[in-house]
Amino acid sequence: LVGGLVVYLTLLLSIAVNNNWNSDFAKIILWAGVVFFIGLLDDLKQVSWPIRLFVQVSAITGVIFSTGVEITYLGTYPVIGAVQLGLFSLPFTILAVTGLTNSFNLIDGIDGLCGGLLLIPVISLILISGGQSHEFDYNLLVVLITLGIFLAFNLTGNAKTHIFMGDAGSAGVGFIVSFLIINQF
């Protein structure tokens, strides 16, 4: 169950190599460390769901207040017009990120499923971004390569090199991808 830890450490290494600790990406990764840590504890020893949920909500709130990345707008619709969340922005973002984080955590059970599904939004974000922000594209590329390498070891037939993401990885990367999606839009 070291896959999640390796993914997280690789993302930290990417930030350290670029010495980019003040970026929103770095802050998201640092707050995701709390989610990775509680997931790692859950992998080693069962942690109750209220504690995991409290830690996730705390980390989400930390990202929102340190980066300002949150869902504020839900789109414009023909009959009702623009839907601005206003005061509901914080609780809506907490609900959305918690839901997506735990969704990825719950589907982690079949080799390659969670990692493969995480590739879909990362690749989509790369295509949508279209080179508008080199820093954002670089960060997405690091996440994509990290997940690709993880999947290469996760889907191998060799029992000696077979690794799993565990709760640390599935919840942690789900947390990161949730905020990358929000940050793009």
Image (cartoon, grey):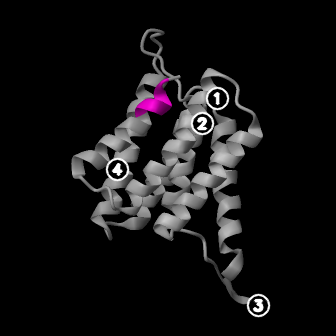
Q: How far apart are marks 1 and 4 (CA)?
A: 29 Å
Q: Residue at x 59, y 57 (%)?
A: 60
Q: In which quarter of the image is residue 35?
A: top right
For the residues labelled 1 and 2, say whether their Cβ atoms are less than 8 Å apart: yes
Q: Sequence-wise, which precedes: disc 1 or disc 4? A: 1
For the residues labelled 3 and 1, say whether their Cβ atoms are less than 8 Å apart: no
Query: How many labels sit on residues?
Result: 4
Q: How far apart are marks 3 and 2 (CA)?
A: 44 Å
Residue 145 x, y percent position in the rendering: 36, 41
Q: What stretch is highlighted in magenta?
A: 2-6
Looking at the rendered structure, the secondary structure element under dot 4 is helix
For the residues labelled 1 and 4, say whether their Cβ atoms are less than 8 Å apart: no
Is 31 on the left-hand or right-hand side of 103? left
Q: Residue at x 55, y 59 (%)?
A: 62
Which mark is nearer the camera, 2 or 4? 2
| Residue type highlighted by circle 1 | Asp
Neighbourhood count class around disc 4 (C-alpha, 10 Å): few under 14, some 14–19, many 20 upward: some
Give 167 or 181, whichever is nearer the viewer: 167
The answer to whether residue 30 is seen in the rendering is: yes
Looking at the rendered structure, the secondary structure element under dot 3 is loop
Neighbourhood count class around disc 2 (C-alpha, 10 Å): few under 14, some 14–19, many 20 upward: many
Question: Which residue, given by chain and number where applicable, does mark 2 sit on?
Answer: 38
Question: Which residue, given by chain and number where applicable, does mark 1 sit on?
Answer: 42
Residue 49 x, y percent position in the rendering: 75, 38
Q: Sequence-wise, which precedes: disc 3 or disc 2? A: 2
Q: Sequence-wise, which precedes: disc 2 or disc 4? A: 2
Give 68 or 166, whichever is nearer the viewer: 68
Q: How far apart are marks 3 and 1 (CA)?
A: 46 Å
Mark carried by residue 79: 3
Q: How far apart are marks 2 and 4 (CA)?
A: 26 Å
Q: Quadrant of residue 97?
A: bottom right
Mark carried by residue 141: 4
